[in-house]
Image: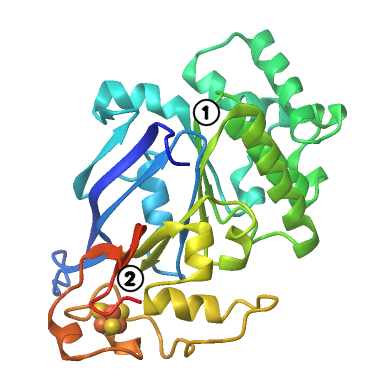
Amino acid sequence: MSGAAELVALERISVHFALGGGGLLGGRRRVLRAAQDVSFSIAEGETLALVGESGSGKSTLGNVVAGLQVPTAGRMRFRGKEMDRPTWKAARRAIQIVFQDPFSALDPRMPVSDIIAEPLRIQGSAGRVARQERAAELVQQVGLPRDALNRYPHEFSGGQRQRIAIARALAPAPALIVADEPLSALDVSIQSQILNLMKDLQEQHRLSYLFISHDLAVVNHLVDRVAVLYLGRLVEVAPRADLFATPSHPYTQALLDSVPRIGVRRRHRTIRGEMPSPLNPPPGCVFHPRCPKAQEICRVEPPQLASAPGRTTQLAACHFKD
Ligand code: SF4
Protein backbone atom coordinates (compact mmCIF):
# COMPACT_ATOMS: atom_id res chain seq x y z
CA MET A 1 0.00 0.00 0.00
CA SER A 2 2.94 2.28 -0.53
CA GLY A 3 1.80 5.79 -1.43
CA ALA A 4 -1.66 5.51 0.20
CA ALA A 5 -2.46 8.19 2.78
CA GLU A 6 -2.28 7.31 6.46
CA LEU A 7 -5.73 6.64 7.93
CA VAL A 8 -4.99 5.70 11.54
CA ALA A 9 -1.74 5.77 13.50
CA LEU A 10 -0.97 4.57 17.02
CA GLU A 11 2.13 5.98 18.70
CA ARG A 12 3.60 4.26 21.74
CA ILE A 13 0.22 3.05 23.00
CA SER A 14 0.21 1.29 26.37
CA VAL A 15 -2.79 -0.19 28.13
CA HIS A 16 -2.39 -1.15 31.78
CA PHE A 17 -5.05 -2.53 34.11
CA ALA A 18 -4.65 -2.16 37.89
CA LEU A 19 -5.71 -5.34 39.69
CA GLY A 20 -6.38 -5.99 43.38
CA GLY A 21 -5.21 -3.83 46.24
CA GLY A 22 -7.37 -1.76 48.61
CA GLY A 23 -10.81 -2.90 49.80
CA LEU A 24 -11.49 -4.83 52.97
CA LEU A 25 -9.08 -7.63 52.14
CA GLY A 26 -6.25 -5.34 51.18
CA GLY A 27 -3.69 -7.20 49.12
CA ARG A 28 -0.97 -6.11 46.78
CA ARG A 29 -1.92 -3.89 43.86
CA ARG A 30 -0.68 -5.39 40.61
CA VAL A 31 -0.52 -4.03 37.10
CA LEU A 32 -1.50 -6.08 34.07
CA ARG A 33 0.34 -4.70 31.03
CA ALA A 34 -1.99 -5.70 28.20
CA ALA A 35 -0.12 -3.54 25.68
CA GLN A 36 3.23 -1.77 25.97
CA ASP A 37 4.62 0.97 23.69
CA VAL A 38 2.87 -0.25 20.56
CA SER A 39 3.13 1.85 17.37
CA PHE A 40 1.67 1.07 13.95
CA SER A 41 -0.33 2.74 11.24
CA ILE A 42 -2.98 1.71 8.71
CA ALA A 43 -3.25 3.37 5.31
CA GLU A 44 -6.44 4.18 3.38
CA GLY A 45 -7.63 0.96 1.73
CA GLU A 46 -5.06 -1.19 3.54
CA THR A 47 -5.59 -4.37 5.56
CA LEU A 48 -3.26 -4.80 8.51
CA ALA A 49 -3.36 -8.07 10.45
CA LEU A 50 -2.67 -8.05 14.18
CA VAL A 51 -1.54 -11.57 15.01
CA GLY A 52 -0.58 -13.30 18.25
CA GLU A 53 -1.48 -16.00 20.72
CA SER A 54 -4.32 -15.62 23.20
CA GLY A 55 -3.25 -13.02 25.79
CA SER A 56 -0.94 -11.15 23.41
CA GLY A 57 -3.01 -7.96 23.70
CA LYS A 58 -4.40 -7.92 20.16
CA SER A 59 -8.06 -7.46 21.13
CA THR A 60 -7.10 -4.75 23.64
CA LEU A 61 -5.37 -2.83 20.85
CA GLY A 62 -8.35 -3.42 18.54
CA ASN A 63 -10.57 -1.89 21.19
CA VAL A 64 -8.22 1.12 21.44
CA VAL A 65 -8.50 1.67 17.67
CA ALA A 66 -12.30 1.28 17.82
CA GLY A 67 -12.53 3.78 20.70
CA LEU A 68 -13.77 1.17 23.19
CA GLN A 69 -10.64 1.27 25.36
CA VAL A 70 -8.85 4.38 26.58
CA PRO A 71 -5.08 3.83 26.51
CA THR A 72 -2.98 4.43 29.61
CA ALA A 73 -0.32 6.19 27.54
CA GLY A 74 0.40 7.07 23.94
CA ARG A 75 -1.31 8.94 21.15
CA MET A 76 -3.56 8.10 18.24
CA ARG A 77 -4.11 10.01 14.99
CA PHE A 78 -7.00 9.75 12.57
CA ARG A 79 -6.45 11.20 9.08
CA GLY A 80 -3.52 13.18 10.44
CA LYS A 81 -5.43 14.71 13.36
CA GLU A 82 -4.64 14.00 16.97
CA MET A 83 -7.55 12.15 18.54
CA ASP A 84 -9.27 14.50 20.96
CA ARG A 85 -12.97 14.69 21.82
CA PRO A 86 -14.23 16.44 18.64
CA THR A 87 -12.03 14.24 16.42
CA TRP A 88 -13.41 11.16 18.14
CA LYS A 89 -16.96 12.18 17.25
CA ALA A 90 -16.10 12.09 13.55
CA ALA A 91 -13.92 9.02 13.89
CA ARG A 92 -16.62 7.08 15.72
CA ARG A 93 -18.61 6.86 12.48
CA ALA A 94 -15.53 6.14 10.41
CA ILE A 95 -14.26 3.27 12.61
CA GLN A 96 -16.57 0.31 13.25
CA ILE A 97 -15.96 -3.10 14.82
CA VAL A 98 -17.05 -6.68 14.07
CA PHE A 99 -16.70 -9.13 16.94
CA GLN A 100 -15.76 -12.79 17.06
CA ASP A 101 -19.09 -14.23 18.17
CA PRO A 102 -21.87 -12.93 15.93
CA PHE A 103 -24.57 -14.45 18.11
CA SER A 104 -23.77 -12.60 21.32
CA ALA A 105 -23.00 -9.42 19.34
CA LEU A 106 -26.56 -9.21 17.95
CA ASP A 107 -29.57 -8.27 20.10
CA PRO A 108 -31.89 -11.34 19.87
CA ARG A 109 -35.01 -9.15 20.41
CA MET A 110 -34.40 -6.92 17.41
CA PRO A 111 -35.28 -7.68 13.78
CA VAL A 112 -32.33 -7.61 11.39
CA SER A 113 -33.44 -4.31 9.83
CA ASP A 114 -33.22 -2.56 13.21
CA ILE A 115 -29.90 -4.26 14.08
CA ILE A 116 -28.28 -3.05 10.87
CA ALA A 117 -29.74 0.45 11.18
CA GLU A 118 -28.84 0.78 14.88
CA PRO A 119 -25.54 2.71 14.43
CA LEU A 120 -27.42 5.29 12.33
CA ARG A 121 -30.15 5.60 14.97
CA ILE A 122 -27.60 6.07 17.75
CA GLN A 123 -25.76 8.71 15.75
CA GLY A 124 -29.05 10.44 14.84
CA SER A 125 -27.73 10.74 11.30
CA ALA A 126 -30.82 9.50 9.41
CA GLY A 127 -34.62 9.33 9.81
CA ARG A 128 -36.47 6.02 10.16
CA VAL A 129 -37.30 5.62 6.48
CA ALA A 130 -33.72 6.39 5.38
CA ARG A 131 -32.41 3.93 7.98
CA GLN A 132 -34.67 1.14 6.72
CA GLU A 133 -33.66 1.85 3.13
CA ARG A 134 -30.00 1.66 4.08
CA ALA A 135 -30.60 -1.66 5.90
CA ALA A 136 -32.33 -3.06 2.77
CA GLU A 137 -29.38 -2.00 0.61
CA LEU A 138 -26.87 -3.60 3.00
CA VAL A 139 -28.57 -7.01 3.35
CA GLN A 140 -28.14 -7.36 -0.41
CA GLN A 141 -24.52 -6.22 -0.34
CA VAL A 142 -23.61 -8.85 2.27
CA GLY A 143 -25.43 -11.62 0.41
CA LEU A 144 -28.50 -12.12 2.60
CA PRO A 145 -32.02 -12.57 1.17
CA ARG A 146 -34.27 -9.49 1.30
CA ASP A 147 -36.72 -11.21 3.67
CA ALA A 148 -33.87 -11.32 6.22
CA LEU A 149 -34.84 -7.77 7.23
CA ASN A 150 -37.92 -8.87 9.20
CA ARG A 151 -36.37 -11.93 10.78
CA TYR A 152 -34.48 -12.35 14.06
CA PRO A 153 -30.85 -13.44 14.72
CA HIS A 154 -31.78 -16.92 16.02
CA GLU A 155 -33.26 -17.74 12.59
CA PHE A 156 -29.82 -17.55 10.93
CA SER A 157 -26.70 -19.72 10.77
CA GLY A 158 -23.36 -18.54 12.24
CA GLY A 159 -22.08 -17.37 8.84
CA GLN A 160 -25.30 -15.47 8.13
CA ARG A 161 -25.16 -13.83 11.54
CA GLN A 162 -21.61 -12.67 10.81
CA ARG A 163 -22.94 -11.19 7.53
CA ILE A 164 -25.54 -9.28 9.59
CA ALA A 165 -22.78 -8.01 11.91
CA ILE A 166 -20.74 -6.87 8.88
CA ALA A 167 -23.79 -5.11 7.42
CA ARG A 168 -24.28 -3.30 10.72
CA ALA A 169 -20.63 -2.20 10.73
CA LEU A 170 -21.04 -0.92 7.14
CA ALA A 171 -24.18 1.12 7.89
CA PRO A 172 -22.42 4.42 8.75
CA ALA A 173 -20.11 4.04 5.67
CA PRO A 174 -16.91 3.58 7.72
CA ALA A 175 -13.36 4.01 6.47
CA LEU A 176 -11.98 1.31 8.79
CA ILE A 177 -13.45 -1.88 10.24
CA VAL A 178 -11.75 -3.54 13.19
CA ALA A 179 -12.49 -7.23 12.64
CA ASP A 180 -11.74 -9.02 15.93
CA GLU A 181 -11.32 -12.74 15.11
CA PRO A 182 -14.35 -12.57 12.78
CA LEU A 183 -13.88 -16.14 11.50
CA SER A 184 -12.86 -18.14 14.52
CA ALA A 185 -16.43 -19.02 15.61
CA LEU A 186 -17.31 -20.24 12.10
CA ASP A 187 -16.95 -23.58 10.28
CA VAL A 188 -13.94 -23.76 7.96
CA SER A 189 -16.22 -23.99 4.90
CA ILE A 190 -17.94 -20.75 5.90
CA GLN A 191 -14.71 -18.92 6.79
CA SER A 192 -13.63 -18.61 3.15
CA GLN A 193 -17.06 -17.22 2.18
CA ILE A 194 -16.80 -14.48 4.80
CA LEU A 195 -13.19 -13.75 3.76
CA ASN A 196 -14.30 -13.37 0.15
CA LEU A 197 -17.17 -11.12 1.21
CA MET A 198 -14.76 -8.91 3.18
CA LYS A 199 -12.47 -8.67 0.14
CA ASP A 200 -15.35 -7.72 -2.17
CA LEU A 201 -16.64 -5.10 0.26
CA GLN A 202 -13.13 -3.65 0.57
CA GLU A 203 -12.97 -3.16 -3.20
CA GLN A 204 -16.47 -1.68 -3.38
CA HIS A 205 -16.05 0.75 -0.50
CA ARG A 206 -12.25 1.26 -0.38
CA LEU A 207 -12.33 0.05 3.21
CA SER A 208 -9.36 -0.43 5.49
CA TYR A 209 -9.33 -3.36 7.91
CA LEU A 210 -7.54 -4.05 11.14
CA PHE A 211 -7.87 -7.84 11.02
CA ILE A 212 -7.21 -9.46 14.40
CA SER A 213 -6.40 -13.16 14.34
CA HIS A 214 -4.45 -15.89 16.12
CA ASP A 215 -4.20 -17.73 12.80
CA LEU A 216 -1.46 -16.79 10.33
CA ALA A 217 -2.90 -19.15 7.71
CA VAL A 218 -6.09 -17.09 7.59
CA VAL A 219 -4.38 -13.69 7.30
CA ASN A 220 -2.32 -14.90 4.33
CA HIS A 221 -5.44 -14.68 2.16
CA LEU A 222 -6.57 -11.18 2.99
CA VAL A 223 -3.99 -8.76 4.33
CA ASP A 224 -1.36 -6.35 2.99
CA ARG A 225 0.85 -6.21 6.09
CA VAL A 226 1.16 -8.22 9.29
CA ALA A 227 1.96 -6.98 12.80
CA VAL A 228 2.95 -9.74 15.23
CA LEU A 229 2.31 -9.23 18.94
CA TYR A 230 3.84 -11.07 21.84
CA LEU A 231 2.91 -10.34 25.45
CA GLY A 232 1.60 -6.89 24.54
CA ARG A 233 4.71 -5.92 22.53
CA LEU A 234 5.04 -5.60 18.79
CA VAL A 235 7.78 -7.99 17.74
CA GLU A 236 7.57 -7.79 13.94
CA VAL A 237 5.80 -5.69 11.31
CA ALA A 238 6.22 -6.48 7.62
CA PRO A 239 4.48 -6.68 4.26
CA ARG A 240 2.65 -10.00 4.12
CA ALA A 241 4.76 -11.58 1.39
CA ASP A 242 8.03 -10.66 3.15
CA LEU A 243 6.85 -11.93 6.50
CA PHE A 244 5.79 -15.27 5.07
CA ALA A 245 8.88 -15.68 2.87
CA THR A 246 11.58 -14.43 5.25
CA PRO A 247 10.30 -14.03 8.82
CA SER A 248 12.83 -12.05 10.83
CA HIS A 249 11.88 -12.54 14.48
CA PRO A 250 12.25 -15.98 16.15
CA TYR A 251 8.66 -15.77 17.43
CA THR A 252 7.29 -15.14 13.92
CA GLN A 253 9.45 -18.00 12.64
CA ALA A 254 7.98 -20.31 15.27
CA LEU A 255 4.42 -19.18 14.52
CA LEU A 256 4.97 -19.84 10.81
CA ASP A 257 6.43 -23.25 11.54
CA SER A 258 3.09 -24.23 13.04
CA VAL A 259 1.28 -23.32 9.79
CA PRO A 260 1.40 -26.11 7.20
CA ARG A 261 2.37 -24.56 3.82
CA ILE A 262 2.64 -26.27 0.46
CA GLY A 263 6.26 -26.49 -0.74
CA VAL A 264 7.75 -25.04 2.46
CA ARG A 265 9.83 -27.30 4.68
CA ARG A 266 10.09 -26.56 8.41
CA ARG A 267 13.25 -24.53 8.92
CA HIS A 268 13.01 -23.41 12.53
CA ARG A 269 12.33 -24.93 15.87
CA THR A 270 8.75 -24.83 17.09
CA ILE A 271 7.85 -22.61 20.00
CA ARG A 272 8.28 -24.10 23.47
CA GLY A 273 6.58 -23.48 26.80
CA GLU A 274 3.75 -21.14 27.71
CA MET A 275 3.47 -17.40 27.32
CA PRO A 276 4.43 -15.75 30.65
CA SER A 277 1.82 -13.77 32.60
CA PRO A 278 1.43 -10.11 31.56
CA LEU A 279 1.32 -9.45 35.32
CA ASN A 280 4.95 -10.48 35.55
CA PRO A 281 6.67 -10.06 32.17
CA PRO A 282 10.27 -11.30 31.94
CA PRO A 283 13.03 -8.64 31.96
CA GLY A 284 14.96 -7.78 28.80
CA CYS A 285 13.36 -9.35 25.75
CA VAL A 286 10.02 -10.72 26.95
CA PHE A 287 10.36 -13.65 24.54
CA HIS A 288 13.71 -14.81 25.94
CA PRO A 289 12.40 -17.71 28.15
CA ARG A 290 10.99 -19.38 25.01
CA CYS A 291 13.52 -18.27 22.41
CA PRO A 292 15.93 -20.81 20.90
CA LYS A 293 18.37 -18.00 19.99
CA ALA A 294 18.46 -16.22 23.39
CA GLN A 295 21.84 -14.91 24.58
CA GLU A 296 22.88 -13.11 27.77
CA ILE A 297 22.01 -9.64 26.40
CA CYS A 298 18.43 -10.84 25.74
CA ARG A 299 17.89 -11.35 29.49
CA VAL A 300 18.72 -7.75 30.36
CA GLU A 301 18.19 -5.42 27.40
CA PRO A 302 14.80 -5.04 25.68
CA PRO A 303 15.31 -5.00 21.89
CA GLN A 304 13.85 -2.10 19.88
CA LEU A 305 11.74 -2.48 16.76
CA ALA A 306 14.11 -1.80 13.85
CA SER A 307 14.52 -2.85 10.24
CA ALA A 308 16.08 -6.20 9.47
CA PRO A 309 19.34 -6.13 7.50
CA GLY A 310 18.64 -5.03 3.93
CA ARG A 311 14.88 -4.79 4.47
CA THR A 312 13.56 -1.29 5.07
CA THR A 313 9.88 -2.26 5.25
CA GLN A 314 10.37 -5.24 7.59
CA LEU A 315 10.79 -4.32 11.26
CA ALA A 316 11.62 -6.70 14.09
CA ALA A 317 12.36 -6.31 17.80
CA CYS A 318 15.26 -8.72 18.25
CA HIS A 319 19.00 -8.37 19.02
CA PHE A 320 19.72 -11.18 16.56
CA LYS A 321 17.12 -10.73 13.85
CA ASP A 322 17.60 -12.65 10.59
FE1 SF4 B 1 15.33 -14.23 21.02
FE2 SF4 B 1 17.11 -12.51 22.01
FE3 SF4 B 1 15.83 -11.95 19.77
FE4 SF4 B 1 14.53 -11.92 22.06
S1 SF4 B 1 16.18 -10.56 21.46
S2 SF4 B 1 13.84 -12.80 20.19
S3 SF4 B 1 15.51 -13.60 23.14
S4 SF4 B 1 17.29 -13.63 20.11
- Apparent side of residue 253 relative to residue 168 in the rendered image (left or right): left
Residue 197 percent location from the top left of the image: 72, 42
The residue at the point 56 percent across, 51 percent down is 223
Residue 287 visible in the current orientation: no
Q: Nearer the viewer, residue 112 or 312?
A: 312
Alpha-carbon span between mark 1 and mark 2: 30 Å
Residue 209 percent location from the top left of the image: 52, 43
Residue 15 percent location from the top left of the image: 26, 55
The residue at the point 44 percent across, 34 percent down is 4
Quickly name the residue at label 1. 174
202 versus 172 height, above or below: below
Q: Residues within 10 Å of mark 2 (few under 14, many from 20)?
A: many
Element at badge 2?
Answer: loop
Q: Nearer the viewer, residue 249 or 110?
A: 249
Q: Amino acid at mark 1?
A: Pro
Earlier along the polypeptide chain: callout 1 or callout 2? 1
89 versus 48 height, above or below: above
Q: Are marks 1 and 2 in contact (CB under 8 Å)?
A: no
Q: Nearer the viewer, residue 52 or 72?
A: 52
Query: Which quarter of the rendering shows the C terminus?
Result: bottom left
The residue at the point 32 percent across, 40 percent down is 9
Q: How many marks?
A: 2
Q: Place residue 67 in its image quadrant.
A: top left
- Apparent side of residue 261 relative to residue 87 in the rendered image (left or right): right
Q: Residues within 10 Å of mark 1 (few under 14, many from 20)?
A: some
